[in-house]
Amino acid sequence: MTTSSLPPSVIATLPGGHYTDENIFALEQARVFESMWVCVVRAADLAKPGAFKTVQVGRESVLVTRARDNSIRAFLNVCRHRGARIKAEECGEVKRAFQCPYHAWTYDLEGKLIAAPNLTKMPDIDRVEYGLINVHVREWLGYVWVNLADDPTPFEEEVQGQVVERLGDLDSIHNYDVANLGLARRTVYDVKSNWKLIVENFMECYHCATIHPELTEVIPEFAEGLATQLSVGHGAEFGEDIEGFTVDGSAGADRIDGVSEDQNRRYYGLTVRPLVFINLVPDHVILHRMFPLAVDRTVVECDWLFRKDVVDSGRDLDSSIELFHRVNVQDFEACERTQLGMGSRAYARGGVLVPSEHHIGGFHEWVLDRLGTTLA
């Protein structure tokens, strides 16, 4: 079936090869993940100078740490001597410096080369020039965002601009005081799916009545296939008899102080391209960050954030957390099932998007534009 022969009510998707082709994935690593702002670490996880985390961004391992001046720094996780990986651990803490385990080249928390065997015999080596390669860093909403590009698009334009497009302004997300919330739960999902399938799934609710019984009970409009991201500023309203965003509709935790009356009893979902989902409800925030590791494998870290006093009180938050955990499991199983079909000849030319999914076509156009390609 050609695009020109499609019925007027549907539009074409990307061909199946865009979800299975290693060459396309390599292009995405270079032109998407390594060229855009990516949310990688919760700043509170780097509690003091010397704390570090390593994350995979495209083809690069990135070392994120807190420096002695309490600022967040990020570097390519590669020794400047012979290219050995500085840190293999996912997280940890050093006292004053990072030392390569191969030849003991040592770098301070700002990335400067400070020691190496016989370094005094090499006075012509510039210790800043031969320091670790810096990565651009921005801290926002209590998270660390990095950009591997030499000359990145301004954060305000690329990241905050998407939030404004969805909510209408930045105040609407700042009302949730995300940076000062406490972490109640973090769950890591290893999803056997291409990253784009996960984004597409999050953007639409055509599937909600089929696989999300708990969610549609709490938010009835989702059962009609309506997606919150179809219009600027729209928040999906809780059902009339629903008390909170919980797995059984019972009352949730204490409302976040800054949440306005207009935002109360509503759910807002945001896709921040390329790899972040933000979910806002009156008493908590759920933030997903994705790490595509292969064309058919994506690790998703999901944080549930509540008021710090609620988290510190030890209050049972299971009914709140369980709702979106079930949504995650249901969604990721659907994405894995879809990934299995991407390599079939039945999907070689792709599928179709029905009217309530047409906005996904904009995502596909964005991907093609980033890759500098078009569909034949």
Image (cartoon, rainbow, N blue to C red):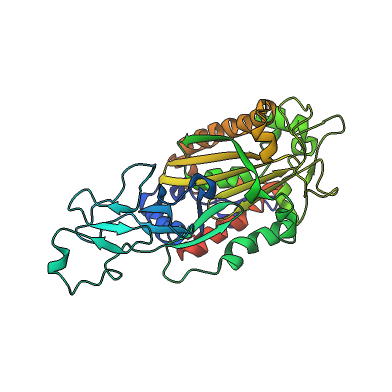
- x, y percentage for residue 268? 72, 47
Q: In the depicted view, which residue is nearer to us: 108 or 226?
A: 108
Hey, which quadrant is residue 296 in on the image? Answer: top left
- x, y percentage for residue 241? 86, 29
The residue positioned 55% from the left and 69% from the top of the image is 154
- x, y percentage for residue 157? 60, 68
Compared across the picture, whether 47 is left or right of 119 comes to right
139 in relation to 151, above or below: above
Compared across the picture, whether 20 is left or right of 212 comes to left
Residue 6 shows in the view: no
Hey, which quadrant is residue 210 in on the image? Answer: top right
The residue positioned 57% from the left and 47% from the top of the image is 199
Compared across the picture, whether 71 is left or right of 293 comes to right
- x, y percentage for residue 343? 43, 41
Q: In the depicted view, which residue is nearer to us: 346 or 331?
A: 331
Residue 321 shows in the view: yes
Q: How many marks?
A: 0
125 in relation to 349, above or below: below
Farthest bottom residue in view? 124
Q: In the depicted view, which residue is nearer to us: 312 or 331?
A: 312
356 in relation to 215, above or below: below
Compared across the picture, whether 35 is left or right of 173 comes to left
